[in-house]
Image (cartoon, helix red, strand yellow):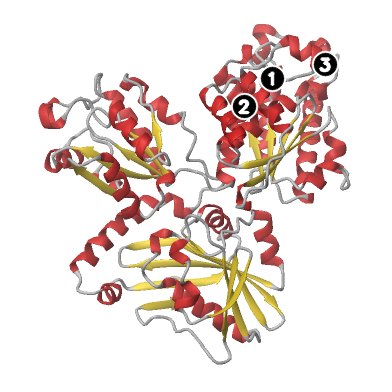
Amino acid sequence: MSEKLAKLLGVVRTDPSYLNLWSTYKRIQTMDLPTPDDLNKIVRLAVIGSSTLEPLAACVDVKTRLLGLFPITFVGGFNTYRQEALDPSSPLYAHNADVIILSVDAWSLLGQMFIAEFVRMSSDDRRAAFQKIVDDVASVAEALETKTSSLILVNNFIVPTFTPLGLVDNKQAYGLRDLFREANAQLEERFRATSRVFVVDLDTVAASFGKANVVNWNTYYRGSVPFSEGFTPILADEYLRYIRALKGLTKKCIVLDLDNTLWGGIIGEDGMEGIKLGNTSPGNEFVDFQRALLSLYNRGVILAVNSKNNPDDALQVLREHPYQVLREEHFAALRINWQSKVQNLIELAHEINIGLDSMVFIDDNPVEREQVRQALPEVLVVDLPKNPRLYRATLEDLHVFDVLSLTAEDMRRGEMYVGKRKRAELERSTGSLEDFLKTLDLKVRIKLADDFDTPRVVQLIGKTNQFNLTTRRHTDAEVQQFRKSPDHRVYSLAVRDRFGDEGVVGVAITRAEKTDWIIDTLLMSCRVIGRNIETAFLAKIIADAREAGAKRLVGEYIPTKKNAPAKDLYERHNFTLLGTEGDVTRWALDITEKTIEVPEYIELVEEWP
């Protein structure tokens, strides 16, 4: 990043006001910025709709840069979204966007006299008018889904605070607000089954902000700008949640302090009976905070503990306190000791096997927070308020744990990390790695990805960093195309052992070229690294390639800052180095002469028993 751009973004980071965002965006437009070396940082954005949307696009663009990404932004013309979406030769399609934001104002579709005549309209006419706006927006979104591989974000409609029916609006069969709510419900239902079109809940975002302040009527009438200066950055943050998830920047783990964070008071001084944790205040705010954390755990967010305490005192609360919601088994790893919390975080990242940039640190002590912030800038440090009654709201406002699909593996992640901890304990008590692996009763299922597996496959492609040979972030649409292609195969790999079911933890995508099979993508979750499952994966691919008539298996490695654990995969499986072109190093194995065997302690199964 250039020094000039870093300085501009520094100003926005300090004061993310609309004026700073807009000013920064306009100045960036005049700069000749070099394309980043890491092409995964590029995100092509498009914002189209029924009004003047450059201010919104500006905020999304600059906020995307604050994530460390390199946006290239297209802004559609005023109320030209239909033409842009329906014409395959339009500039929108030439832009080849990764993310398309479709923002259509319902009032632009309802007609100028709609509100004036609404009271005297028949119920059928009212319903017909709203069915038309749903069909209009949905048909445009469906056209975008058909013609692109983009992630498509469709705003729903803001339910108005005013209605010409006044107090009797909800006494009518089709009051105005009821029709808006029904239109929003129809939009959600229309796109519930698709994995690429998301209905952005603009109405809820507006309600949270305050609907009375969503529009600046001066800029609305003068320039058809739909959103006020105060609301536009807030709405941009909502889109950022999708972009963050799309680019694999979602946080995975919350690391928690204990005293005055999970409970009130200090366990070492106040004792079990003295800490604030119960069903009345003070105490119920901590219970409520823990319930909110448990809801994230149940969604797949990893929890860990980093506390300066005597382990016996703290563990007694986790195990025995009647009002403690989060128990010891909810935590993937615990560091309860008197050493630096910075060192503890480093150790936790190593033990859980995730990057520090996947961690969120929550601690009531501002000194501890500042030490972590300075020593480990990759970790997101939450400024926990002094008032514990605001803890839950602070957690719920983070919006950094979003995913674009919720899989069975997500729902079981907490139990999977408990299993991981138990495996580590078993490994420490076993004489050798091979003896340890033999005791696991490892079963691996490798098959072509089906409709059930594909959301998890796309999720793994989007977020796996460490054991990822090429880090190619194929989209859902691309994976679907690979599945249909006669030249490609998309594999999913699932693992079970004596400690539980890991679910789908590996993906491979191969491409046939004459007598070569090229491994475009090969990745595995960090949870299963170290069990030589990748050897079984290669063995299965070789068997299939040989059966299809291939003579060589060609693997590629593209280095990133995080994928060093995968660097020697092909070398240690006796592939021959072909050479390096740009960042891509290619290896080949002559499968007419060489093979790779499945380790004896791994059982390959067709289906789970």
Q: Secondary structure at mark 3?
A: helix
Q: Secondary structure at mark 2?
A: helix
Q: Could you say which quadrant of the image residue 438 lies in?
A: bottom left
The reply to whether dot 2 and dot 3 touch (C-beta < 8 Å) is no
Disc 2 residue type (three-letter): Leu
Precedes in sequence: disc 2 or disc 3:
3
Precedes in sequence: disc 1 or disc 3:
3
The spot of residue 496 in percent (x, y) is: 38, 67
The spot of residue 263 in percent (x, y) is: 24, 29
Q: Secondary structure at mark 1?
A: loop
Establish if 52 lies above or below 585. above
Q: Residue furthest bottom?
A: 593
Residue pointed to by mark 2: 235
Establish if 183 lies above or below 559. above
Residue pointed to by mark 3: 114
Residue pointed to by mark 1: 227
Q: Residues within 10 Å of mark 2 (few under 14, many from 20)?
A: many
